[in-house]
Amino acid sequence: MEDALPNRPPSRGEPALTERMLIADVVNRRMQELHLTNPELGRLTGLNAALISNLRNARNNATLDTLARVAHALEIRVADLFLRRTD
């Protein structure tokens, strides 16, 4: 079962690392399910493989446009990128 993260902004001094890690986990799991590599996802999204790598390793603050492209390529909703797995 999956739960959405609480609707709260990061506190002062706390970067949005938790949310980036959550997105990275969802992207990594879905890429594994679809047997996609970084360059393949890059081609599907029009994004370079380095940006995909940064997203997968929670190293960047992705724009909404980037998240939308990635979600579309992974055949999920943007909202699904923010769902926490509980299994």
Image: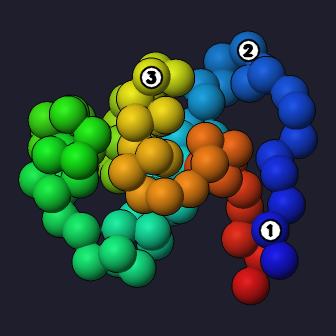
So how many labels did they put on this image? 3
Q: CA distance from mark 2 to mark 3?
A: 26 Å
Badge 1 or badge 2: first in the primary sequence: 1
Residue drawn at (37%, 51%), measured in percent from left and top?
73
In the figure, residue 70 lies in which quadrant? top left
Q: Are marks 1 and 3 in contact (CB under 8 Å)?
A: no
Q: CA distance from mark 1 to mark 2?
A: 27 Å
Residue 86 drawn above or below residue 31 = below
The disc labelled 1 sits on which kind of residue? Glu
Residue drawn at (46%, 71%), measured in percent from left and top?
29
- Reading the image, the residue beneath label 3 is 65
Question: Which residue is at the front of the view, 52 or 76?
Answer: 76
Report the disc number at residue 2: 1
- Reading the image, the residue beneath label 2 is 12
Q: Element at badge 1?
A: strand
On the rendered structure, is 29 left or right of 38?
right
The picture places residue 48, in percent across and down from the top left corner, at 14, 35
Quarter placement of the C terminus: bottom right
Question: Which residue is at the front of the view, 62 or 46?
Answer: 46
Mark 1 packing: few (<14 Cα in 10 Å), some, or many (20+)? few
Badge 2 or badge 3: first in the primary sequence: 2
Report the disc number at residue 17: none
Can residue 18 be seen from the camera position used here? no
On the rendered structure, is 80 left or right of 74?
right
The disc labelled 2 sits on which kind of residue? Arg
Q: Nearer the viewer, mark 1 or mark 2?
A: 1
The picture places residue 8, in percent across and down from the top left corner, at 86, 28
Q: Are marks 1 and 2 in contact (CB under 8 Å)?
A: no
